[in-house]
Image (cartoon, rainbow, N blue to C red):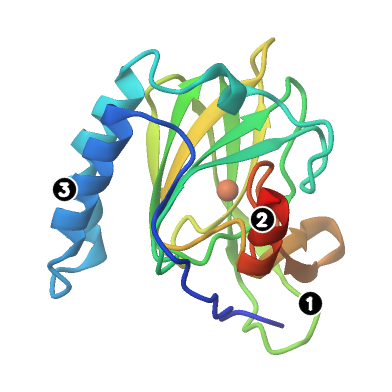
Amino acid sequence: MTNDTILEPLPEDQWFIESQELRSLIATVREITANAAENRTQTLAKLEPYFQELLAQEQWLPEKFAQVNPESKMGGGIGQWLLYRAKDRSLSVFSLVIPPGSTTPVHDHLAWGLIGLYKGNQEETVYRRVDNGSAEGHAQLQITEVRSLQRGDIYRLLPPDGDIHAVKTTSESESVSIHLLGNDTGCIWRHQFIPESHSVKSFRSGYSNAPCKEEEEKYAQV
Ligand SMILES: [Fe+2]
C-alpha cells in the first residue's frame, strides 16, 4: 500500500483562478505555518478565522469551479477543481462539487487541513480505523460521527483524527466545499475504503482541471 507518494516539485506555484481573496489567504497560511515548532492543532485554530472569512465572501469562486464533472475520476459526477497548489506540493486549495444525492467514496487525505462548506448542504460520515493496518487490502472502520453541514460550517483534518470520511450532498442542488490541505491531495496515492466488506485500496483522485505530472502538463499546454 503506497502511503508516502513523493511528488516532483513544480517549476512554480500554480494559480488556477485570479482571486485577491485566495491570494491573501495563502499569504496568511504561509505566515502561520512558517512556525514549524507550533503544533498543528494551534496552527489550524489560528488559520480557521481567515478560512471562515474566505468562505463568507461571495463572488470569489468562478462559476466554472463550482460545476459538477460528469467525467469525474471519483465517480458520481463529482468535480474536484484545483484552485491553487504550492510548487513543493505541500499545500493545495480545491473545490469539491458533489451533485445532489451523490456521495463520495469513503476516503482519507493523509494531511492536515480545513474544509468548509461554500454552497448547499452536506452530510459527513466520519470514520476511524480500528485495525492495525497490517493485513494488505483489509481495513476495519468504525463510524465516529455523522454530522450535517451548512454553508459556512468548517471542520478540521488532523490525521488520524477526522481523516477518513464520506460526504453526501443533501441539498436539492449541488454542494460545493472548499479544501485547504497540507499536501497536493489530488495527486498523492491515498486510500479508498469499503466499510461493508472491510476492504481498502490505493486511490488517486486526480483533479478535474489539472494533471498530476509535469510531463502531462507540458503535453496539456501544447
Ligand atoms: Fe474528503
Q: Give the residue number, with chain letter if any, for mark 2.
A: 211
Q: Position of residue 4 (x, y in %)?
A: 56, 81
- Side (left or right) of 178 relative to 38: right
Measured along the vertical axis of the image, is residue 165 above or below residue 141?
Answer: above
User: Hey, what amino acid is under mark 2?
Assistant: Pro
Please tell me in which quadrant of the rendered image residue 64 appears. top right
| Residue that appears at 56% across and 17% down | 63
Q: Where is mark 1, residue-wise?
A: 138
Quarter holding the N terminus? bottom right
Sequence-wise, the earlier of marks 1 and 3 is 3
Question: What amino acid is at disc 3?
Answer: Lys
Q: CA distance from mark 1 to mark 3?
A: 37 Å
Which residue, given by chain and number where applicable, does mark 3 sit on? Answer: 46
* Tag in front: 2 or 1: 2
Residue depicted at 50% across the width and 21% down the height: 62
Which of the two marks, 2 or 3, is nearer to us in this view? 2
Q: Quadrant of residue 140?
A: bottom right
